[in-house]
Image (cartoon, rainbow, N blue to C red):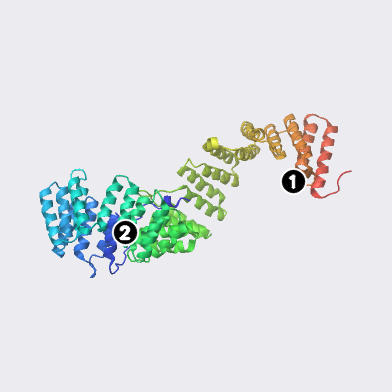
Amino acid sequence: MNLKKILPALVLGAALTASADGYKDGIEYYKAGQYANAKTILERNLNDAATDKAMAYYYLGQTALAQKDLAAAKDNFQKGVSANADCPYNYVGLGAIDLLNGDKKAAETQFSTAQKLGKKNNEITVDIARAYYNADPVKYSAEVDKLLAKAHKDSKNQEPSIYILEGDMLFDAKDLGGAAGKYEQAITWDKDNPEGYVKYANAYIGVNPIYSVNKLEELKAKQPQSALAQRELAEKYYETSQWTKAAQQYGEYIQNPNHFPEDKARYSVLLYANSEYQKSLDVANELLAQDPNNFVMNRIKMLDLAGLNQNEAADAAAKKFLALTPKGAEKFTPNDFITYAGVLEGMGQDSLAVFQYEAAVDADPTRADNIKTLSSAYNKAGMSQKAAEAFEKYMNARGEETDLNDQLQASGRWLVAASKAGDDEALRIADADKGIAAINAVINGVTDVKPDFYDRLATLYYVRANAATPEVVDTYEKCISLLDADPEAQTDPKKLNLYKKAYSFIGLYYRDVAGDKEKALENFDKADYYNNLATGGAAAQ
């Protein structure tokens, strides 16, 4: 299963408890470029006694800026000034808005105030450079360069935020290696800089996933209580398909008061992927108690109950899930219907399971494996004509990838369909012809022809004509020739029964068609001989 396909955007709306210094987690999320998460945590912790409101409002304003909401950004920066007029950061924010509004002079006034209040604060200089860069990196390239040079000089090249901005600029230019190098420099001057670790990991995830994961493991070791460190490491395990580690890390992360509801949902999914069905179900039920119609959690509940073989409960869960109306990126997948089909089969309701297998094919008609599964379901339910037709669609979907095993199985499907065509002679002949073509493709395509292949072909000839024919005789004689050349054929019960069948059908031809009673009796005697060998009776002498 592709787990990422069952995790669209999750909105659960669960209320979470703030942590003592949780607003700092919000700042970390902002600096890592996760603006929605930053806003959630900053707002959640805004009224906490330990929160520096001026800084919280500054980053709320920067988050709003990143989300193109200038009105909200300005409101937050002004609130930050009101909370602490001596805090330089909110003036940087107000200046950034002036730049975006095309008023450079007003922006310069705000920046001047910020620099006076933060005379020895090199991060203020870098934040002003970032404001120019975000407003127009080409138009204000000179200002950006000048401010970065000042920050380098004043800090003696030791201010981490310089390298973060320089890394971001390289990242925007798609120089991922150069960006990662800058982020590494930021870490060099601040070993506890989460922004550097996370951005390094994001730069390298598509280039060298191992480096990406290793860097976040370093961050987690240094800041084991950081929600950002915990979540980002869990995410990278998830993105690199390390499901067990991802589940373990999410399990730790969701104990952090600043976790997100959607992450708890992902934890449930990962527990399911690790076959920890009961644990996954417990988390899913917890989230469903808050949001009963959550699409993904209803899906996981069905999957977990199916995994636990609690078919009646899984049936109820499936009916509820499949009655939901998908929203946004949500959609039903073939696996949803196939899982429910398996539940129904487990309850002995094979005919109802067929409808779910049909729905799985409808959900993605390009999936050849699902069409093959539908064919098997038709066959199990005794719907032989549909089983053969579905198998033909499966082979068409595979196209050039169709192999001789497919042809062999197809010949069997068409044989059963032809044998059950009843009085519809035209259908019986058409089905048999398709089966004959399929088994001939096998016989002509292999170097080691098995006696069973000729048995299949001869049976198809018999069913096609509804009688023994010269083709039946000729084909079974080829089958007997292969059996005679096999030293094990005289002791293998399966092959002895094949002898019996071949001689029986040849005898039928001579008795009913050729009218040669002597040859008929000769072949029937041979059939009896091999029947006695197969059943352990006395062999004819």
x and y, in percent, of residue 20 in the image: 28, 69
Residue 485 position, x and y percent, is: 78, 38
Q: Which residue is mark 1?
A: 494
Image point (79%, 43%), residue name: 487
Q: Which residue appears at 31% of the width and 59% of the height?
A: 188
Say what secondary structure mark 2 lies in: helix
Total marks shown come to: 2
Location of residue 193 by image quarter:
bottom left
Question: Height in image: 181 above or below 251?
Answer: above
Graded by Cα atoms within 10 Å as few (under 14), some (14 to 19) or many (20 or more), the crowding at tag 1 reads few
Return the mark for residue 243. Answer: none
Left or right of residue 186, residue 448 in this image: right
Horizontal arrangement in the rendering, residue 320 relative to residue 258 (left or right): right
Measured from the top left, where is residue 512 in percent x and y?
A: 78, 32
For this rendering, which residue is in front, 191 or 245? 191
Disc 1 marks a residue whose amino acid type is Lys
Residue at disc 1, secondary structure = helix
Q: Nearer the viewer, residue 398 or 380?
A: 398
Q: CA distance from mark 2 to mark 1?
A: 74 Å
311 and 87: which one is in front? Answer: 87
Mark in the foreground, 2 or 1: 2
What type is the residue that disc 2 sits on? Thr
Say which quadrant the C terminus sits in.
top right
Query: Circles 2 and 1: CB distance less than 8 Å?
Result: no
Q: Would you place residue 48 above or below residue 510 in this image?
A: below
202 sits to left or right of 245:
left
Q: Which residue is mark 2?
A: 188
Which corner quadrant of the image does residue 173 belong to?
top left
Asked if residue 539 shows in the view, the reply is yes
List x then y, in percent, for residue 84: 15, 65
